[in-house]
Image (spheres, helix red, strand yellow):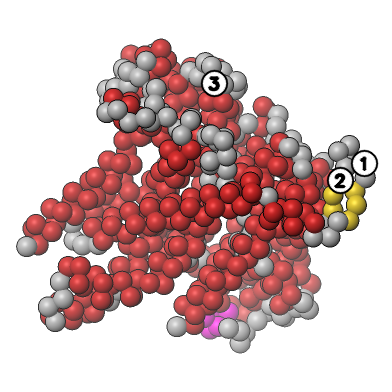
Amino acid sequence: MERRTIFPGWRLPLLLVAPQLLLTLVFFYWPAAEGLWQSLTRTDAFGIHTRFVGLANFAALFADPRYRSSVAITLVFCAAVTALSLGSGLVLALAADRELRGRDLYRVLLIWPYAVAPAIAAVLWLLLLNPQIGTIGRWLVALGVHWDYALNGTQALLLVIVASAWKQVSYNFLFVLAGLQSIPRAVIEAARMDGAKGFHRFRTIQLPLLAPTLFFLVIVDLVYAAFDTFGVIQAMTQGGPGRATETLVFKVYQDGVVNLDLGSSAAQSVVLMGGVILLTALQFRFLGRRVAS
Amino acid sequence: MSGCRDWLAHLVLGLGAALFLLPIWLAFCAATLDPAAIDRGELSLVPRLDHLGVFLEVLRHGGPGVGPVWRMLAVSAAMALAIALGKIAISILSAYAVVFFRFPFRRTAFWIIFVTLMLPVEVRIIPTYAVMADLHFIDTFQGLTVPLIASATATLLFRQTFVAIPDELLEAARMDGAGPLRFLWDVVLPVSAANLAALFVILFVYGWNQYLWPLLAATSPRLDTVVIGIVKMIGIDTSTEWNKVMATAVLALVPPVLVVVGLQRWFVKGLTEGEK
């Protein structure tokens, strides 16, 4: 969409756009280019000689069972966090979408966790689920469950999923509620007169109208789970036990910062960038259509 | 029928609210307990009001592995404010330039910014660190904040808002002899107030909650944010003083929660209208 009326001149606008462009070039394009270059090179153990190795880093990466298992863990983790947070957000929003006493209070009580840092959510959940000090953790042990996420990989994954999803419910709740409230009352009334009730009404009327919002949330939740949960994992499991909670971002950090394998870490970053660009493109196709309609 | 459904809604919402509040209430209570009692698993849902001094103590003296919490809170606040205000400022200016002017390479400039839309710092973490080292930004406040200020999302959001401003408004302003900067200040900013407020909340929370970037970019304890500090405190396996950890966690939650709840109305409106 273009405006009819504009201001004349080109010096001022260039000046206005310059800071943003400069930051973008220095902190996005330069690192991206450097990362791409690093992903095609290998440096010897002493960090002296760097040589071009083509796609060898990528080949090594995809041949590495550790990397493949990290991909699988990330997929399970992201899918579970998305399903859990979007599902809970949806249920809460459906409950809140009505004239209810105390509505405003409920809303405050349900949105504040948006402000909680993932790493802090992790610390709060330790207090619930730690087998020695956690309230729920001790119940589980008392009930005879072998609850010890420091030893059991599945339990560790479950732990980071719950803590990560908990924090993200608010965001989903807000968007679904806004989506529900933007459905015209007339549509709901018409459905009611046709005798559509409860779940049937939800499935045939609300769900289709909500689909774009839900799709948007799936993308946002996937990106959140993939990239914003480093703090949760670092605080709760450090990627362990074994490598049971080593997601892709956690592995980039481990290999690049801790193990100083820059070539491989850069190749992993490039793969991640590819993933993000794919998700962005998906989202944009949908966002674009939505803006046009 | 409707009464029964309302009852169900209350149940669901009440349960949800409780699930959110429970961990934080438990953390508050744990902060006031003896660390030895927590180690034995003797958590309670009743705080010991005579032990509220622990909050002052961590504020003043910190805990194992970290300095005073007031300092870390100050670093977090400075970081969150710098990121939020910095992002808003450069995004408004660039969106304004792209919408209200025609200049050479306008489309190119827009696309250069736009392509970075969803490239979070986490995916380019190592190369960005290398660039920072070249710029001597490691372990500085600039290093902590400036790389996180570049952002396409805010620019896009403002562009959407600005595009919707009617041409008549601009024509009238030009008729009155208002220049571009005057128009920005007197008309465009007030019109975008809701977006500004919403974006401020989102970006403040984003800045406050950063973990991976500060962990890498600023290793000096002088620049510890409160989120970094908490994870450091529990990193000491043998002698985690859980009461102090939880007191710090509660303190770390207060500012961003206040911002979200305080600006709630704006935040919800701007967030859901502008799509992030």
Mark linked to residue A43:
2
Q: Which residue is mark 1?
A: A48
Which x, y percent locates residue B245?
A: 48, 24
Q: Which residue is mark 3?
A: B237
Point 60% across, 67% down: residue: A278
User: Quick one: label 3, few (<14), some, or many (20+) residues within 10 Å?
Assistant: few
Which x, y percent locates residue A138?
A: 33, 26
* Corner quadrant of residue A136: top left
The outermost residue toward the right is A49
Point 73% across, 71% down: residue: B109
The span from disc 1 to disc 2 (Cα, nearest Å) is 7 Å
The amino acid type, in three-letter code, at marker 1 is: Ile
Residue B167 included in the magenta stretch of the image = yes
The span from disc 1 to disc 3 (Cα, nearest Å) is 37 Å
Magenta-drawn segment:
B166-171
Q: Nearer the viewer, residue B122 or B151?
A: B122
Question: Is residue B238 something one can see in this rendering?
Answer: yes
The span from disc 2 to disc 3 (Cα, nearest Å) is 35 Å
Point 69% across, 54% down: residue: A63
